[in-house]
Every structure is written in C-alpha cells, then in structure tokens.
Amino acid sequence: MLKNFVNKRDLPVFLGFIAIVLLAPIIMAPLGAGYPDLLQKFAIFGIFAIGFNILFGLTGYLSFGHAAFLGVGSYTAVWTFKLLTVNVVPAIFLSTLMGGLFALLIGVISLRRSGIYFSILTLAFAQMAYNLAYSVLTPITNGETGLQLTLNDSRVIDNMFREVSKTSLPSTDFFGLSMSGFSGFYFCAVVLIICFYISLRIFRSPFGVMLKAVKSNQERMSYTGLNTRPYTLAAFVISGMFAGLAGGLMAVTDPLAGAERMQWTVGGEVVLMTILGGAGTLIGPVLGAVTIKYFENIFSSLNDSILNSFFSFMPEPMQHVFTAVAGLFVGEGWHLTLGALFVVIVVFLPGGLMEGIGRIGKLFRRGGDDGDKKEPAAKFATPAE
Amino acid sequence: MDVILLQLLNGLDKGGAYALIALGLTLTFGTLGIVNFAHGALFMLGAFCAVTLKSLLNLQMVVLDPIKKTAWGTPLEIKTPYVEKWFGEFGSVLLEYSVPLSILLAIPIMLLIGVAIERGLIKHFYKRPHADQILVTFGLAIVMQEIVKSIFGANPIPQPAPEIFAGSADVGAWFGMNAGAVVYPWWRMVYLGFSAIIIAGVFSFLQFTTFGMVVRAGMADRETVGLMGIDIDRRFTIVFGLAAIVAGMAGVMYTPILSPDYHMGMDFLVLSFVVVVVGGMGSLPGAVAAGFLLGILQSFASLNEVKNIFPGIDQIIIYLVAVVTLLVRPRGLMGRKGVMES
C-alpha cells in the first residue's frame, strides 16, 4: 500500500521529513527556537515557500507577486471567522480556494509573457492589490488598522451550534481544540506535511516532468507541438493556492489580517527563502524558510550587551571592535545579514543550501570507497535542472 | 484649463525623476544586458550624499555665552557652523546651497560606487540568467539600504531647498490667468529643468562623442565591436558608472521634494521598472517618454473628478498602464526589435 503512496526512493526523505517536523519542538529547543510561535512561522512560511517552489523551481517563472495571494488568504480566513465560524477548517479551505482563484485571474494575464516581463507583471498586480487594500477596499480590508475579530461579528454557524460568549473575543479552534500554543503548531505541522507530500507527488509526476521541461527549454517544447500555457498556469494556480493556504494559516494562528502582508517585499522574502534553500529541490524551500525565520528571530533579538558578553574572552579593545562590527549585523540590522548572505548564496551557491549540503556530502563520500554506488543519491540532492 | 495645466506641471517633476532613473536602468540594460534591481538604491544613495554634505557643513562650534542665560538658567549656547566661522559670508552661502552643491559630491562618489559594483559583482553575472541578475542585485539593494539605515537611522531627513527657490511661482499669471490659479513650487520647476538638462546631456554624450558612438555600436552589436579591437567591456563599465551618476544626481535634487529615507529607493525602483517596461526594454527615448507620460498620468488620476468615477485609480494607474502595455504592445512603446522579446 505504501508503494502506491510514496515512491520507494523518496520514502526515507518523506519519513525523515515527517519525523523532523513532528519532533521540531524537541529538536529546535537547544537552538532557542522550541516555542510554538516561532515553530508556527517555520511551518507557515515553509508552506508558502513549497508553493512558490512549485512555480519557480519547476518552471523557472520568477513571480514577485505571491504576497498578494498570501494577503488574500489572510483576509478570506478572517472574514470566514467573522461571518461563519471560528472553526479553522472552513477558513483554510476558503482561503486556499480564494488564493487559487486570484492566482487564476492574475496567472491568465501574466503568463502571456515570460522572463522579466512576467516578473514585472506579477509585481504590478501585487502592488495594485496592496495599494487597493490600503485605499478603496477599506470596507473589506479595514485599511491600515487591519482586519480583526469583533464582538458583534455575525458568525452564523457558531450561533447555530454552540453558546457564543458575548463578552470575550473568541479564539480560533479546530473542533474545540484551541489553536494557540503547541496545538496550533501541530495543526500547521500536519498541513505542512500534507503540502510537502503534494509537492513530492507533483515533482515525481509526469506533470512535474513537463514543468521541468518547460524550464529547461520552452521553445523546444512548443516545437514539439505542446501548448505549455496550461501547464504553467496550473503550476501558477497551485502555488497561488499554497500561498493562500499559508495566509489562511497565519490568520488561524493570529486572527488579524493587514495589508502589509501584500507588499511586494513579502513576495521578495519568499523568493529569498526558496533561493536560499535551493530552488527546484524538495526540501530546500522549507530549509530556506526555517533558516530565514530563525535568523530573523534570533539575530533581531541580539543586542550589544549580549554581543559584549559573547566576545568577553577577548582583550577589551578587541572586544569593543568586534562588538561594534558584529552589532551592525544583528538587532535592527539583521536585514543587512540577510542581504549579504543572499548575495553570497547567489554568487557562490546558485543551488542554495541544498547544493552546499550536496557538495559537502560528496566531499565526504570521495574519501570512502563506495563513492560510485551512492552517486544517484547525490544527484537527487542537487537541484533538478 | 488651469486645473489641467496644474496637473501637467505636477506630473512633470515626478516624471522627471522617473525618467532619470529609467534612463539609467535602460543604459545598464542596453549595454551590459543586466537587469539591475539595485538601481533604486543608487538613487537613494545619491539622496543621502545630499544629507551627508549638509551634516558635514553643519558641523558646529558651540560657545557658551558668558552673560545671557536660557529660560532654564543654563548658559546660552551660541552655535556657529565651522564653515561660517572660517569663510564668513561665503560659508553661509555654502550652507544655503548645500543641496545643489551635493551634486559635486555625488558625482565622484556615485562613479566610484558604480564602477565598484560593476567590477566587483555584476561582471560575474553577464552570462547568468536574468533571474539570477535580479536576485543578486536585489540582495545588493538590501545591503546598501541597510547600511544607510544603520548610519542615518530609519526616519526621513528633511532637506530644505535654497531660500530663493523656497516659495511657489504663480505660473497661471504668466499665461494671463487669474493670479493664484496655478501655483507651482519653484524647486519643482528647477527639478524639471535639471532633469531636462541631464537627459539632454546624456543623449548628446551618446550621440555626438566618439565614446558615445562606440557605446551605441556596442549596444547594437557587442561582438562585432569587440572583434574590431575595442575594449568594449571597459566602456560599458564606465557607462554603468554614468548610469549610477545619473541616478545619484536625480536623488540629490529630489531631496527637497521628498525627504530621503532608506527605503525610498525601493519605492522608486518598482515604479521605474514599470516605466522601463512601458517605454520598451533597451530604448532610451522610450524610457524618457514613458517616465514623463506616467508621471503626468499619475497626477491626472489623482484629480478628484477622476477619482469619483474610478475610485482608487490614482493608486493603480501606473501598474494598470504597464499591464495593458505589456499585453497590447509586447515591445513597449518604443522597444527595438529583437531586444528581450518573449
């Protein structure tokens, strides 16, 4: 039965992924990241990046507009909480659906062009969505304040089936299980595993192979008589749905949606995550998302006094110099680290962290005798070209 | 009539900024074939050249007044900037004109930064796909903007224009309309004139000098020019420096209109990419025309009469124009055949 479920070669990867995700609170605890807030972020941005990777990693179409779908998903989820129920199931279904719908709309238009023009078109659409959410669409988006739950929300379904408190704001739940703390994380984790599975199946399917063919040479694909548009559009819509789902999950863990989620720099962030981890690889995007979110939280919480104690083993003048230099890169300035890291990655490791891991792995294997035997595994670890 | 004239003028100065940035973007794209997402950051760096010069000129000597006291009972501090102390009257003039003077500072600095970026980083990306170029320059832009943020802080730093340009011109009166019907700030007019001069300068440099001729030949057919024994790479490096200078000067002069902060580059970058695409990738006149066109369209869209018919149009007009242009005229307004057609 398992054979139909996952390809035999991918089984260890998939099982390993499940184990790591479910044990994440224990694994990440020594690194200072074992608390549910951050773990949730890992999972949500992991989903976002997995979806983006289905578009960028497989077809090579670089979209700067995915933040729009994220925002749409968030707004949809919060509206579902407000109008229907605070149960999260309808919310995440609807936000996925809306993300997909928006992606269909934008994709049909944007995919008429490719290359840089496609990037600009998606960027233009994302900026339009962001500007409109801030201005005319204020009745729907609540403008700068952001959309949030209030006491007089109608919540039709909740009112039918259970007592609704009139004095305190409801919290989101999954059939009674509150979506805060570790239960919230495990909900996101299960969704992440499902998404990873879907992406795995897409990568190994004929559809995925077709997308890779589009990436390597679209012209040749057209010459063979294939219309590539439906394939790329499908990829775009799927990745839009993933983004909508991620946005919905953000609202699940914190029922608040703001327009800043739609800004193109957020779309830029998911690009960074995917590239950092390794575009076109299975695990890369999740790895990239975790790395960036981890450093965002850890680096931005460091300050000069912590650095000072960190460098305290040095003689005092050196300690000050090191603190001053390192201080530029942490705390408020952690974006500088991110930008610099990103430049270094693009220049030296175009395949992202996964390529780095692959290279290190090869290095070790070269020492052993069974180098040739494990070659296929190494190929799998490097990005699919 | 007066409303139309006013919006036209309002659009022109913004259009001037778009055109200058788009001109630089197109230059780098046409010569080096690089899609430079760090160009907006260069504009921002130029603006901060003005901030730097002003704070340098404003270094003050503080003397405690022996007799006078402030309301709190502490001795009154008399602050005199060093330039005023050393140069007297001339020092005050220097202070007054710090923004235009910053151009003199910006030119060498931007040239240096531009050449350093090209030689140090972008050189290695000629043969890589456009996506990689976008990504690496995007990372570079983040780095530059964060460095500026760590030095100058996150808040906008206002830069006053020189006193004579501080007021507004009653443009309407010149054309025989009622006084006060069309009022336009002097500095914006200066900016408009300035951008026209720079644009004319760049065009005549490319058109009438030998260097410019070689560059144009290189844009048309790089390989052949290289085969003729001309070191085209070196020229293109200088062109990148030139583009950086243009962006930097545009930034310097824009500071009295918009107080510079560290992310102004990103805001302008997105818009100027749209401008380049509308004008046609690789077409210099197209970039300039589209810059002014979009600036004017944007200011007309923010008219109340227009906004009442299409709510929110002022927020999205530029992007809307870009989308329509890209779909209807794939090459942009004046794009050359064979450049980035896909």
Image: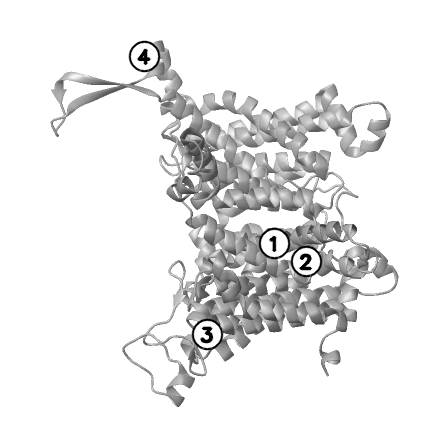
Q: Which residue is mark 2?
A: A56
Q: Amino acid at mark 4?
A: Lys
Q: Amino acid at mark 1?
A: Val
Which quadrant would residue A258 be assigned to in this image?
A: bottom left
**A276 shown above or below A205:** above
- Whether residue B326 is visible here, answered yes or no, is no
Q: Residue at x 47, y 31 (%)?
A: B48
Q: Which residue is mark 1?
A: A271
Mark 2 and mark 4: span between their CA atoms? 61 Å
- Pointer 1 and pointer 2: residues touching (CB < 8 Å)? yes
Mark 2 and mark 3: span between their CA atoms? 32 Å
- Please tell me how crowded label 2 is: few (under 14), some (14-19), or many (20+) other residues with Cα within 10 Å: many
Q: In the depicted view, which residue is nearer to us: A8 or A211?
A: A8
**A259 shown above or below A178:** above
Labels 1, 4: front one: 1
Side of A85 where B113 appears, left or right: right
- Pointer 2 and pointer 4: residues touching (CB < 8 Å)? no
Side of A209 where A28 appears, left or right: left
* Subunit bearing disc 3: A
**A356 shown above or below A248:** above
Q: Amino acid at mark 3?
A: Ser
- Pointer 3 and pointer 4: residues touching (CB < 8 Å)? no
**Mark 4 residue element:** helix
* Subunit bearing disc 2: A
Q: Amino acid at mark 2?
A: Phe
Q: Which residue is mark 3?
A: A183
Q: Residue at x 51, y 51 (%)?
A: A295
- Please tell me how crowded label 3 is: few (under 14), some (14-19), or many (20+) other residues with Cα within 10 Å: some
